[in-house]
């Protein structure tokens, strides 16, 4: 597995540790309550959902990242058809962010 995909292993671990929120409404609720530490959006998320979640993240100052497609992130967490995931734990969020940023830099 390439270094750029290491975040997927961590995402699966966060899911098993129950540190993730799934589902658009639940994610938005966690953004508003400041429970979400990081939001991951699939690259193939529909424009309406994508805009809604990005706008909420921006307003409430919650970091978000555009990641792989829905099939890839769904497979990582063992749930099908997921386009957005909120990470609720600061440690997981920081590590996933650093892995994603590292893969962008090279």
Image (spheres, rainbow, N blue to C red):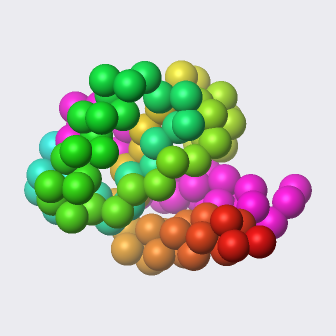
Which residue is depicted at the point 58% across and 47% down? 67
Quarter of the image with the N terminus is bottom right
Residue 6 locus on image (x, y percent): 73, 62
* Residue 77 coordinates in the image, percent (x, y): 59, 42
Q: Residue at x 66, y 53 (%)?
A: 8
Image-quadrant location for residue 33? bottom left
Q: Is 89 placed above or below 40 here? A: below
Q: Is residue 106 above or below residue 73?
A: below
Q: Give whichever of 103, 8 is nearer the camera.
A: 103
Residue 83 relative to residue 56: left or right: right
Is 7 magenta? The answer is: yes
Q: Is residue 95 left or right of residue 88?
A: right
Picture coordinates of residue 98, whole percent (x, y): 57, 75
Residue appearing at x 65%, y 61% in the figure = 7
Q: In this view of the protein, can residue 99 be seen by the observer?
A: no
* Residue 31 on the magenta span: no
Read off the magenta span: 1-28
Q: Main secondary structure of the magenta part?
A: helix
Q: Is residue 23 above or below residue 41?
A: above
């Amino acid at each position: 597995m390439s270094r750029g995909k290491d975040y997927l292993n961590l995402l699966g671990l966060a899911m098993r540790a129950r540190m993730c929120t799934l589902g658009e409404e639940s994610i938005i609720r966690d953004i508003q309550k400041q429970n979400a530490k990081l939001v991951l959006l699939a690259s193939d998320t529909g424009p309406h959902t994508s805009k809604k979640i990005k706008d909420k993240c921006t307003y409430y100052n919650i970091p978000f990242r555009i990641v792989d497609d829905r099939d890839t992130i769904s497979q990582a967490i063992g749930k099908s058809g997921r386009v957005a995931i909120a990470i609720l734990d600061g440690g997981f969020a920081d590590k996933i962010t650093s892995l994603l940023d590292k893969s962008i830099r090279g």
